[in-house]
Amino acid sequence: MKERLLDLIACPQCKSRFGVKAAVVEKREYAPEWRDRVCSFWASHRHGGDQLDPDRLWQSYCTEIVAGSLVCTACGVEYAIEGGVPRILDPALRTTAGGMGRGRPTTDTRIDQQMDEIAPVPKDTSRELFDQIQLANQSNYGYEWKAFKHQYDQWETVYKESYVAEDDAYFGGRLGLDAGCGMGRYSLVPVQKGAEVVGVDLSNAIEAAYEKAREIPTFHAIQGDIFNLPFTENYFDFAQSLGVIHITPDPEGALRSILNAVRPNGKVFLMVYQTFEDENLLKHSLLKVVNFMRRLTVRLPSNVLYTLLYFMVPVVLVTCYFPSWILWHLGLRSLATALPYNYKQYGRRRFRDIHMNLFDRFGNPVERRYNRKQMEAWMTSAGFQSYELRAADGWMVAGVKPQSEAAPAESLSCVG
């Protein structure tokens, strides 16, 4: 972790600042233009203050703490820094069998039942089930995002076309949170557009994100819990959580936690799985088949599932992708996009992404999906000042946090 991160994080228990104990420190070098960028960022930012010392600021980015402990200056709670990553987790999530946060096939934590239709599981009503889902998510996604950690230019296209339809200029000079960042593939897009981003993930997939963060001063990686974020309230200019909150034990609680971290009038970008019952009856019907298969696949060890789905890729290509390619080039584009794993989705991506998304579909410990009516009700009850909702192989939400809790959310558009 960069020393600069100490100015951004806070104890999840009492919201006080951290000190560092017994640290192993390395110095890093970045291209000279980064210095001007971060200094101008904090000089103009609301967290910058009037007493900005550019030299001291820049040194805090160039100082890497690779091992040691974070100690809360108020309550004294201590968290390890391992492999350059601060592990700000409750004791139940600091597993030792497979390292910090599991993610190895020899220490898989799988679930006891299919949980596609499961209701939210608030901590105070069923702690055992809540913790089981958390540990299963740690295991599954720790394995997934370290196995599929490839980074390439098309991620930016996917991000802008399918997840966050925001002009590049929006991100310049803003501080952002990526809640459930995985290996950091979508954290880097706003960073490249001028934002400074803190990525948080429950699993040790964060180690893959940290490999990217080591090379970029304005990207930070933390292993943490979306339900106990290590930041003060009203802190970030924007937050994104793409394909995450619906697989947590309590999606509504996860969204509240993210909203608490964002300042009034700040934006929250979400991607949530959809049922397709309003938009695509073929996909909706196929999901029923997938859910039946998931009764077995969610119980398989990660490495076994990975291998089985590798041999499923040619089947998907023959039954979905290539027929969609033909229909697309015949001008029958509505039919082409009705198929799953279609040409529009994957025409500019690697076929390895199909393997990745198959693993994501069949390995998710929990997979909740929502129709349009449910999404509108959820976003209204969340308390957004306003929000945009659109369908693009999932529900995409851009919501604005209100100045106060007074007014209900207003839907600006509902397209797709």
Image (spheres, helix red, strand yellow):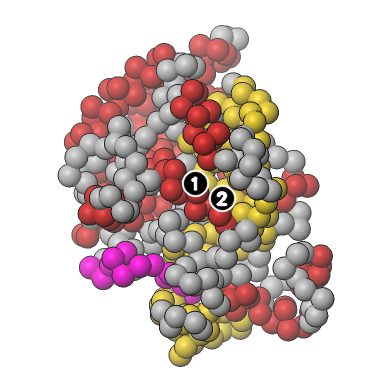
Horizontal and vertical percent for residue 301? 21, 49
Residue 294 picture quarter:
top left
Residue 295 picture quarter:
top left
Horizontal and vertical percent for residue 8? 61, 70
Quarter placement of the C terminus: top right
Q: Residue at x 55, y 77 (%)?
A: 17
Horizontal and vertical percent for residue 396? 56, 34
Q: For this rendering, which residue is in front, 127 or 388?
A: 127
Q: Which disc number belongs to residue 32?
A: none
Horizontal and vertical percent for residue 368? 37, 35
Q: For this rendering, which residue is in front, 54 or 35?
A: 54
Q: Which residues are magenta?
A: 83-97
Tags 1 and 2 touching, CB below 8 Å: yes
Q: Which disc number belongs to residue 259?
A: 2
Q: For this rendering, which residue is in front, 39 or 76?
A: 76
Quarter placement of the N terminus: bottom right
Q: Determine the secondary structure under disc 1.
A: helix
Q: Residue at x 44, y 61 (%)?
A: 228
Outermost residue on the front side: it is 406
> Mark 1 and mark 2: span between their CA atoms?
6 Å
Q: Residue at x 62, y 34 (%)?
A: 409
What crowding class fits label 2: few (fewer than 14 Cα within 10 Å), some (14-19), or many (20 or more)? many
Q: Is residue 205 visible?
A: no
Mark 1 sits on what residue?
255
Q: Is residue 57 above or below residue 362?
A: below
What crowding class fits label 1: few (fewer than 14 Cα within 10 Å), some (14-19), or many (20 or more)? many
